[in-house]
Amino acid sequence: VRPVESGGGLVMPGGSLRLSCRASGAITSEFNRDAMAWYRQVPGHERELVASVTLSGTTNYADSVKGRFTVSRDNARKMAYLQMNSLKSDDTAVYFCNRLNYPWSWGQGTQVTVSS
């Protein structure tokens, strides 16, 4: 199983993007085994946990994105989403999704660039 992220792009500061994550090759029970999480990574830095959502929908966020990002999941479709609003230049990174506690292999990620 390898996550497939999409929805990234170039956006101006203050703009919004919605990222999607498809658990390619996963059966439903694999997807529904664990919380799903979004991470981001800037070249030269470690991957950072941004947000997570449990099977029941409980969410957690990094302090840097609280109030701006919203994580969600669709268990039937085996999808996870990250709605990003009020984007800042510091949000520029490659964004990845994965299971939180039992990660699959990492996908390619999707590039988010916030710039005027």
Image: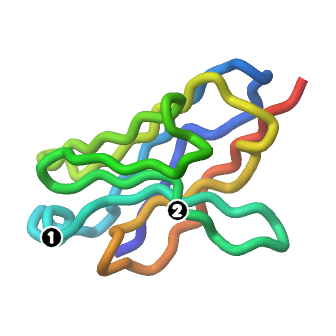
Q: Residue furthest right?
A: 116
Name the residue rendered at 22%, 47% in the picture. Answer: 58
Question: In the rendered image, which quarter is residue 70 located in?
Answer: top left
Name the residue rendered at 23%, 68% in the picture. Answer: 26
- State whether residue 67 is above or below residue 50: above
Q: Position of residue 2 (x, y in %)?
A: 41, 71
Question: In the rendered image, which quarter is residue 25 located in?
Answer: bottom left
If the image is split into quadrants, where does the N terminus sit? Answer: bottom left
Q: Which amino acid does label 2 sit on?
A: Leu
Name the residue rendered at 34%, 68% in the picture. Answer: 99
- How many marks can you see? 2
Neighbour tally class for label 1: few under 14, some 14-19, many 20 plus, Cα within 10 Å: few
If the image is split into quadrants, where does the C terminus sit? Answer: top right
Cα separation, mark 1 vs mark 2, equals: 19 Å
- Looking at the image, what colour scheme do you see? rainbow
Name the residue rendered at 15%, 70% in the picture. Answer: 33
Q: Is residue 21 left or right of residue 106?
A: left
Q: In this view, does 26 lie to the left or right of 18?
A: left
Q: Report which residue position mark 2 lands on.
A: 49
Question: In the rendered image, which quarter is residue 94 located in?
Answer: bottom right
Q: Position of residue 73 (x, y in %)?
A: 26, 44
Q: In this view, does 94 lie to the left or right of 44?
A: left
Q: Report which residue position mark 1 lands on.
A: 33
Q: Is residue 93 left or right of residue 105?
A: right
CB under 8 Å between discs 1 and 2? no
Q: Where is residue 107 in the image (x, y as percent from the top left)?
A: 52, 68
Disc 2, SS:
strand
The nearer-to-camera label among 1 and 2 is 2
